[in-house]
Image (cartoon, rainbow, N blue to C red):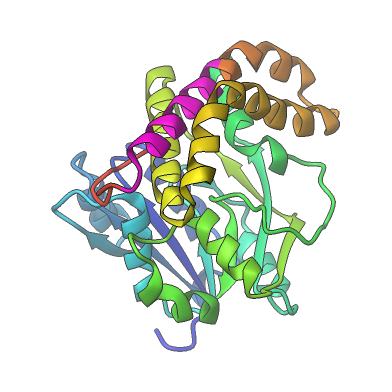
């Protein structure tokens, strides 16, 4: 496997039928022979067995014990051998030239490159609301720009950036905190709208609410490790206004795209519920502080 150009790394817990659409789209890549795909999972729904049977070209890392997605992603990254490491998930679908464009983009000086995320599951209003909740800021059209704010399911690194940091990734790979650290070190980031993937997760309302809440809880709990008591107190007392701020964060960029405005406006009640769940999760994280969430599996 030496000399590979790209490693695609993914972490999963019970992704269900999503794996077929995702992995089939990777198998159709024009760059397929120059890439490897690594999936780390601790599923109980037969995901591992299905990957072994239907997609034997995938490097599968199966864990019998519960492992959080950050920990799974770290293990997938540890196995990667490509010059470029693309971080995504099994709920995405990729155009055939995605890996080729990604590798070409990394011929630049930018160490971290992300791209656009389009909605690949638009049958229901719930699909749109879940998409806007996570990826409104990365919808096309978008300008090429230097920014550390990149979609968690569409970000790639020159592999040395990850390899240098693996041993210091306490609790696993957490994109937000990792990017904050890279930004502090002066690492260069790029958002490239020529790179496009499709978010195709089949969400349920209860599942998305639960995942949003758990993700926010984990985010805030980890964040308290590097916060003063005063800063933590301020976060707690300002949580009541957080849903309004978060709702604005999701609506404003989507309106600016001048696309899918009808779906966005109809999604606002659902978005309001989602950001309230997020704010409640953050409050719990700030109140409880650092805790053992290594086995917490969210979304």
The residue that appears at 44% across and 30% down in the rendered structure is 283
Q: Using residue 236 as the reference point, say whether residue 61 is left or right of it.
A: left
Say which quadrant the N terminus sits in.
Answer: bottom left
Helix, strand or loop: magenta stretch: helix
Residue segment shown in magenta: 273-290
In the rendered view, tell whether residue 121 sits above or below residue 204: below
Find residue 286 and report its horizontal and vertical position in percent: 42, 38
Any part of residue 61 in sight: yes
Image quadrant for the C terminus? top left
State the image coordinates of residue 21 (x, y, percent, origin top left). 45, 43
Which residue is found at the position 83% from the left and 33% from the top? 257
160 vs 40, left or right, is: right
284 falls in the magenta region: yes
Q: Position of residue 70 (x, y in %)?
A: 37, 55
Seen in the picture, residue 17 relative to 165 is either above or below; the reply is above
Q: Is residue 144 left or right of residue 58?
A: right
- Residue at the bottom extreme, as displayed: 2
Of 80 and 26, which appears nearest the observer? 80
Q: Which of the two residues, 214 or 86, is positioned nearer the viewer here?
A: 214
Name the residue rendered at 67%, 27% in the picture.
Answer: 245
Near-viewer residue (248 or 17) = 248
Is 266 covered by the magenta stretch? no
In the image, what residue occupies the spot 32% across and 58% down? 71
Q: Which picture quadrant has residue 60?
A: bottom left
158 vs 56: above or below: below
């Amino acid at each position: 496997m030496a000399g590979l150009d790209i490693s695609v790394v993914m972490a999963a817990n019970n992704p269900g039928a999503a794996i077929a659409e995702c992995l089939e789209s990777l198998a159709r890549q024009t760059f397929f022979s120059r890439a490897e795909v690594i999936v780390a999972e601790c599923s109980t729904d037969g995901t591992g067995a299905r990957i072994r049977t239907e997609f034997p070209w995938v490097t599968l890392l199966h864990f019998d014990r519960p492992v959080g997605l950050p920990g799974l992603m770290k293990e997938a990254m540890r196995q990667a051998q490509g010059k470029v490491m693309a971080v995504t998930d099994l709920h995405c679908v990729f155009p055939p030239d995605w890996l080729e464009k990604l590798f070409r983009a990394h011929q630049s000086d930018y160490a971290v490159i992300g791209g656009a995320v389009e909605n690949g599951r638009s049958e229901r209003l719930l699909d749109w609301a879940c998409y806007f909740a996570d990826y409104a800021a990365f919808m096309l059209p978008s300008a090429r720009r230097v920014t550390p704010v990149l979609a968690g399911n569409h970000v790639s690194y020159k592999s040395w950036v990850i390899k240098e940091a693996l041993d210091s990734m306490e609790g696993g790979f957490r994109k937000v905190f990792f990017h904050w650290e890279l930004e502090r070190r002066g690492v260069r980031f790029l958002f490239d709208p020529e790179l496009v993937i499709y978010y195709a997760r089949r969400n349920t309302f209860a599942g998305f609410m639960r995942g949003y809440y758990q993700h926010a809880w984990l985010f805030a709990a980890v964040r308290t490790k590097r916060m003063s008591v005063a800063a933590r107190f301020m976060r707690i007392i300002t949580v009541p206004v957080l849903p309004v701020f978060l709702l604005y964060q999701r609506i404003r960029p989507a309106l600016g795209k001048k696309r899918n405005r009808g779906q966005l406006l109809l999604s606002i009640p659902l978005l309001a519920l989602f950001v309230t769940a997020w704010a409640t999760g953050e409050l719990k994280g700030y109140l409880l502080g650092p805790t053992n969430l290594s086995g917490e599996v969210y979304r």
